[in-house]
Image (cartoon, rainbow, N blue to C red):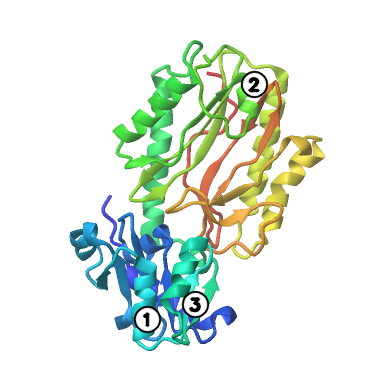
Amino acid sequence: MPIIHDTAARRDRLRSQLRERPDAEQVSAFVVSDLVNVRYLTGFTGSNAAVLIDVSDPAGDRIATDGRYLTQVAAQVPDVESVIERACVPALVVHARTAGASRIGFEADAETVAGHRALTASIEDSGVGLVGLTGVVQALRSVKDAGEIALLRAACAIGDAALAQIIADGVLRAGTTERQAARALEFEMYRLGADGIAFETIVAAGAHSAIPHHRPTHTALADGDLVKIDFGAVVGGYHSDMTRTFVLRRAADWQRDIYDLVAAAQAAGRAALRPGADLRQVDAAARDVIDEAGHGDHYVHGLGHGVGLEIHEAPGIGKLAAGTLPCGAAVTVEPGVYLPGWGGVRIEDTLVVTQGDPELLTTTDKTFTVI
């Protein structure tokens, strides 16, 4: 679906953030090298690029890429002057230095040791200082605008429809292998218009469902199995993420019990999604439900994470998370209980945090279902 992102406004917000950050004091230029952040700020989707943000003047912004993308960068980023160099980051640092920058920021969480050496060499004997900053663009990306939310809705809708289709087609039945079910689901997402799959689809049957990130095998589904399916679609670069767990043909009491427990924890986690909520407290809202039922040791991951241009992005929601939940964040809520050797249940939705109740983007029914 065609969405035109206001990337100039994003760069302006980044400029404002750089002026306000204490660790960016006196930084007059900032080089962005993480390719996802480059896409967010410019719309450029090539495999080699970096962006220079002039903190005081938008006219000083530059995008660097190599000659393979000469036509692409002109088409995708017509409003930013381009620099054609293979070594993008050093080229932009040299440009900023030549333009008079005395302190240049860079993405410390995106640079390798070798990359940092090249940066240092590019300013040698110039008197210019380098300032490593972390999480700058990621903080902007954690709050989604209307266009981003529209793409997330579309990706989630494709996921919902694809899952419904393979269930209607009888794919989830005894004898189908985990890999066959995963490939069928992925095919449906592509058929329904997905640009790609968000990550390797998880189909985990029987005892495999107790492995949180099980990779599908040639194991056949069997009657009585818990079947955990974790998957997503990509639309316009934006990822959906949903997990549903079913039982084939007949359910045991223990399966119903842990399903009901996870469902209660997931409902508590969704209800805790409020602007300004402490991220650890959001996690605790769901975790406490599972802990009080005596299954705390069987819940082995955080409650959720942000989704957007990446399948896992800020904010993270877990026991060790720091910060608060911003209004406009798109996040998952995905508690699970995993009983090794027996099976596990995870229920996951993607939601958008609003001033009222969070907007649910993944709408497949969460009622305990025997297929």
Of 185 and 340, the residue lying toward us: 340
Q: Tag 1, which secondary structure?
A: helix
Is residue 307 something one can see in this rendering?
yes
Q: How many numbered circles does the render carry?
A: 3
Q: Is residue 44 above or below residue 221?
A: below
Q: Which kind of residue does numbered mark 1 sit on?
A: Ala
Q: How far is the residue under mark 1 from the one under mark 3?
A: 19 Å
Q: In terms of sequence position, does the residue under pointer 1 or pointer 3 come before the other?
A: 3
Left or right of 368 in this view: 122: left
Query: Label 1: few (<14), some or many (≥20) within 10 Å?
Result: many
- Where, by quadrant of the figure, is residue 290 drawn? top right
Residue at the spot of label 2: 207
Q: CA distance from mark 2 to mark 1?
A: 57 Å
Q: Which mark is residue 96?
A: 1
Look at the numbered disc 3 and give the secondary structure of its residue: helix
Q: Position of residue 124 (x, y in %)?
A: 45, 80
